[in-house]
Amino acid sequence: MNLTLNKNLCLMYGISFFQGMVFYAPVAALYRQACGLNMLQITLIESISLFLCIALEFPWGILAEKIGYSRTIAVCCGIYLLSKIVFWNAHSFTGFLTERILLSFSLAGLSGVDLSLLYFSVPKEQYQKVCGIYNSLGTGGLVVSSLVFTLFFQDHYRTAALFTVLSYSAAFAASLFLSPLPGHCRHTQTRGNLSSSQKADVLLLLKTFLQNKRVLLFLTGTALLSEMRQNVTVFLSQLQYTRCGSSPFLMGCFYILASLAGLFGFFSSAATKKAGEFTFSCLCFLLSALFCFLLGITENPFLSAACVIGIQLLGTLAQPLFYRLQNEEIRVSCRAAALSLQAVFLECTGAALSPAYGFLADRYLPCAFFAGTISCLAGWGFYVLWYKKRS
């Protein structure tokens, strides 16, 4: 691996770590509720954000092919930083909505581009391992920030938001030193327009994607699992701990343990090889469904924490495998655009499901967990159908 690729890999690792340092994460839902928002409003903002991501995903993917992956990441990290500054100063629905709108611009731009840069920076046989490390470093940053919150902040939500601004400033600074990819990607990094062959690939990509029912099955299955994990670990878990009578300190400890579970992404490749790709994937879906069901029927804080940790761990182990499978389904040269188009489909699912989780949680929290159980089982069914067609 040459010097440029080594440098980019190290910088991407650093960006992942600093952007993982969200100091208010253990109380993300409670933070918003303290400003007067209910769960439906919180998840509605999430849904609006996802729909905006959908609108921006594919244009960002095309733009990334024009201006280069490294420049795209730097611009998006700058917007990401701005969103955290807005969050730090938000006090109402409008303020938090503005934060999510900015975040949508950033996430839509980063989606697919960061993974593409990693894909071209390492040998193909190392990609799943590198992707696991990349995700684990993000979780490592989250563990550090959660520990700081638990020890020093607890009820000081605004201070936690300020420290998050500082960590995202470091990520933006690191992104400024990313170098354009050499060799086979040079033309996409230096030319201002897509070549004729790339334009043809984009049109072929759109046509192929819409006609490829097999890929749609895979994306639907993984989206159902991913959205359940997102809602449970980020929002519903905090409501569950409150339901169980947990103190802020205990909630912080639980969040740290769940975050630590997210560090095991680098074991994804080994776990896949040991259990087998299909068996391992099925376990991730079915065990997640079980844990979600248990959350719905228990008011024990420690069992609840164990279930949330289990969901986090399974999602962490499954994510690098799903990333690899997504990349292997791409047959055109515009890889960032292809991944962005896939992300559009994933976010459509998320945008539809997120308000449903919030609506159910506002009325009766266990119903939201039972909905998550059904989503996992449905996702498993879609995944099995995809795997059979793939075979």
Image (cartoon, rainbow, N blue to C red):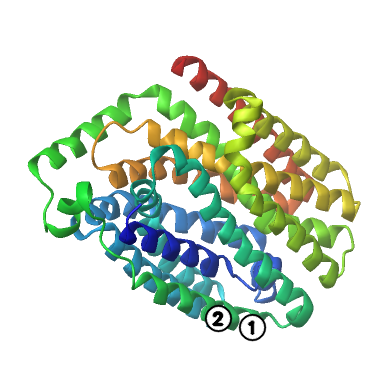
Q: Is residue 356 visible?
A: no
Q: Residue under circle 1?
A: 158
Q: Quadrant of residue 335?
A: top left
Q: Residue 120 appears at what percent x and percent y?
A: 33, 47
Q: CA distance from mark 1 to mark 2?
A: 6 Å
Q: Residue furthest front?
A: 2
Q: Residue under circle 2?
A: 88
Q: Amino acid at mark 1?
A: Arg
Query: Is 33 in front, or is 316?
Result: 316
Would you place residue 326 above or below residue 7 in this image?
A: above
Q: Is residue 254 left or right of residue 127?
A: right
Q: Quadrant of residue 196?
A: top left
Q: Amino acid at mark 2?
A: Trp
Would you place residue 54 above or below residue 199 in this image?
A: below
Q: Residue 95 appears at what percent x and percent y?
A: 51, 76
Query: Is 197 in front, or is 42?
Result: 197
Q: Secondary structure at mark 2?
A: helix
Q: Residue at x 45, y 53 (%)?
A: 50
Q: Residues within 10 Å of mark 1 (few under 14, many from 20)?
A: some
Q: Residue 187 appears at what percent x and percent y?
A: 15, 52
Q: Residue at x 31, y 61 (%)?
A: 4
